[in-house]
Structure formats: C-alpha cells, structure tokens
Amino acid sequence: MSKQRNKVVSLPVIESNAAGIDVGATEIFVAVPADRDPEPIRCFPAFTVDLERLADWLQQCRIRTVAMESTGVYWIPLFQILEKRKIDVRLVNAHHVKNVPGRKTDVSDCQWIQHLHSVGLLRGSFRPDDEICAIRSLWRHRDNLIQLATLHLQHMQKALDQMNLQIHHVISDLDGTTGLAIMDAILAGERDPLKLAQLRHPRIRASEETIMKSLVGDYREEHLFTLRQSLKAYRYYQELIQEVDAQVKQMMQRLPSKVAEGEEPPQGSKRRARKTPWRNEPPQLREDLYRTFGVDLTEIPGVNSLTAQMLLTEIGPNLDRFPTAAAFCSWLRLCPDPKISGGQVLSSRTRPTKNRAALALRVATQALHRSDCFLGDYFRRMKARMGTPKAMTATAHKLARIIFHMITTQQPYDATVFQKQEERRKHQKSARLHAQARELGFQLIPINVVP
C-alpha cells in the first residue's frame, strides 16, 4: 500500500506585487512578498519623513498595490502619500481582515493583510474624490460646531431656569429674534417685564401678558454672569459656522456644473414652499446643490437641502462607482442581509452601520409621517406592520433608489410614476373594506362626491 503524502493546498497568488500595512498611532508595520527584500517586514514611525521613506521602500520592492485597515484617522496621511506615488491603495474594512484565532501581533497582522490581498480576498472601501473629501471634512467640522453651539444654548437655558425665568418655555426658539433680543436687554440691565415683553416679534404665538409673566424672576448676579458668557460663546460659534459656510460655498463653486450657467432649480410641485431656510442651513444651498447634482433632490418628499448636502459630502455628485441601485442600497446598508443555513433563514436583518448618508435618509423619513403622498402612505403602512425603526429603514431604501435614479439618469422627480401604485393600493383598501362589511352583514354604498 503506497504511502499518501500530505499535500499543502494554497490559494493561487493573483497579485504578486501586493503589500499589507498595519496602521497604528505611532508605528506602522509593512509586509511585502518574501522575495522582494531580505527584510520583508519593517516598522516605520508615523512621522511624515518616515512615511515618505516607507513609500520609497515600497517602490524599490516594485509594489503596485497596498491594503490597509481603516483605523481611525491614522491611515489618512499614509493613504495620501501613497496615492501621490501612483500606488493603488485599498482601504479595507477591519471586519474583513480578521485573523485566525491565535497570538495577535502587529507583525502577524500586516503579514495576514498582505496574504489576503495577494490572493484577491480583499475589496477596497468606497472613498469619494479629493474635492468631495475636502468638503466632507469641513461639513463634519461644521456639525461639531453646531453641537458645541447647542451645548452653550443649553447652558443659557439652565441659567434662566435657575433665575426662574420661563421665557424659553414660552417661545419656541431661545436663539430666535425674540429670545436673543430679550436676553441682550436683560444683560444690559433691563428688568421691567413690560419693556422686555415689548421686544416680542409679531409672529410669536404667545401673548404679551404671557411673556411678561415668564420674565418675572430672581435676577442673581452669578447666573447673569453665566448667561452672559454662554451667550457670548454661542455667538462666537455662530460666527465660526458662517466662516465654514463661506469656505464650503467656495469649494462647491469649483465643482463642475451639470446645468447651464445661471439656471435655477425649478419651482416644483410642492404645495407649501418654504419661505425661510431650515435651521442651520447655509444661504443659497439649494441652488448650489442643483448646479452640482444636475437635478433638484429637494423635490423628493422628505428630502430637504441639508439632507441633499449630506449626500453630496459623503458620496459625491456622481454615483458611477455603484453599478446598480441595489449595489448603492447595499453600500448604505438599507437592504436585508439574509443568513441562510440548511435552507432555513436564520436572520434577514439589515447590517448595523454608522454611514452618515444612510442616517440622513432615515431622518428624512420622519418628515413623511403626515405626508399625503405615496411615500407617506408607504411609511405609515410599514410602521403599522413592522414598527417605526423597520419602517424608517424600508422607506429610506425607497428614497435611496429614487435618488440613485434621479442622479444617474438626470431626470427630475416625477410623482406620477407612483399613480398606478396609489390606484392599486386604493383598490386593495376598497376590496378589504367590502370584505369586512360582508363578514359583519353590511353592505357598503359608494357616495358620489359632487365638486
């Protein structure tokens, strides 16, 4: 009986010029194929000079493509340097490069990444162009500034509560025209409730008598000091936000335009057009988005200018990297992720994600709760059937498909596409009502409504 020899079966090497990088805050470990250098694994500090030396070493080893984990923001400097050297850099998900159980070190991690990349088992994550990444960085910084400004607004409300001034419970916005005018007068030394109430804006719903009652309190020196500093800090952050808006507008003007010069977005078919911008909305944002996208995404029910701006900063004006709408929704993680074993569905939940574009679409679905359009009716039906969280995901999935179709085909939003679906839905509701009436022994008679 012949002896059978154990044969080691290995995957074929698809990319022989591949390297793997394990990125850290202070040290970066790099692994290249063993035949490229006597020392195929090296460690480099995270200084810029050492990163340039790392790129030189990769070029000496004839490396054409590199894979690295998306670890915090530590990968960005190295990514940009390698990209300038014309090296194909693939930013991979950390969940896709998990090593087999055993001892975990930085050396073994970079070797494992290099092995997976050489046999073609890693896919690069989506990253917009440099122009969009620059706008995205400023827009995320803007979100942080808004959160800091809101924090100081809460400090102002706390100071008013400690003085038992209920003005922020009477008016809707303490940082509005009336609220800021009253606080400025209080800090200037005015204590007469009548004179303070006369600063009320005509559009405020609360009466002057109610505002007078809310401004009677204990004006203590320490709380006034806190109110003054909080108001000063709030206005300072508002100035910073305006500077960011101006810088973002300049960068958006450099993006290629998809419409004729001077062309404005169509008026649209929405019943109630907003005369005032949304809170924290930069000026003329809708016009800039229309010029960049080529279509007006705000015509979609539930989508406003801030939602469209979030999509631009996270994805870009083009969706060419997504071959189909299904691939786009899968990247957003708005579609089910079925897990089947033995012919049985174990789970079909959507994968968890922190994608800001997906979060913006989920927030947009909340505006459809009372909408009388097809999407509003769809959201309410899904909410009654599956609950609010799943209904938001399902409706956001529809919004993503509509946005993908509008951007890729450059066609405006057409609500008549849903007319057939609305008519079919009405027919189903009518048939269900008639069936329920017959079960209870009743007969429904239609009423002809005379216009």
Image: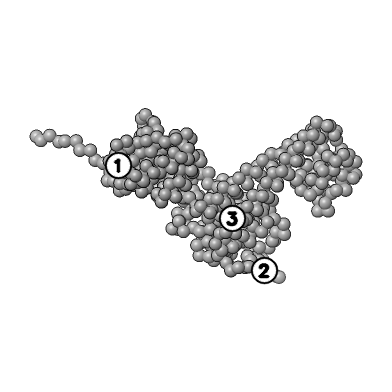
Q: Do the numbered discs 3 and 2 sit on residues whose CB atoms are within 8 Å?
A: no
Which residue ends up furthest to the left in the rendered image? Answer: 1
Q: Position of residue 82 (x, y in %)?
A: 43, 46
Q: Amino acid at mark 1?
A: Arg
Residue topped by disc 3: 251
Q: Position of residue 442 (x, y in %)?
A: 62, 58
Residue topped by disc 1: 36
Q: Position of residue 425 (x, y in %)?
A: 56, 60
Apparent side of residue 35 relative to residue 216 in the rendered image (left or right): left
When the figure is inspected, residue 101 is found, relative to residue 59, above or below; the finding is above
Mark 3 nearby-residue class (10 Å; few <14, some 14–19, many ≥20): some
The numbered mark, 1 or 3, whose residue comes first in the sequence reads: 1
Secondary structure at badge 2 equals loop
Numbered disc in front, either 1 or 3: 1
* Residue situated in front as seen by the camera: 314 or 389: 314
When the figure is inspected, residue 403 is found, relative to residue 144, above or below; the finding is below
* Residue situated in front as seen by the camera: 52 or 332: 52
**Quarter of the image containing the C terminus?**
bottom right
Secondary structure at badge 3 equals helix
Q: Do the numbered discs 1 and 3 sit on residues whose CB atoms are within 8 Å?
A: no
Secondary structure at badge 1 equals loop
Q: Which image quarter: residue 21?
A: top left
Q: Is residue 430 something that shows in the picture?
A: no
Name the residue: 60% across, 68% down: 261
Q: CA distance from mark 2 to mark 1?
A: 84 Å
The numbered mark, 2 or 1, whose residue comes first in the sequence reads: 1
Residue topped by disc 2: 448
Q: CA distance from mark 3 to mark 2?
A: 57 Å
* Residue situated in front as seen by the camera: 393 or 91: 91
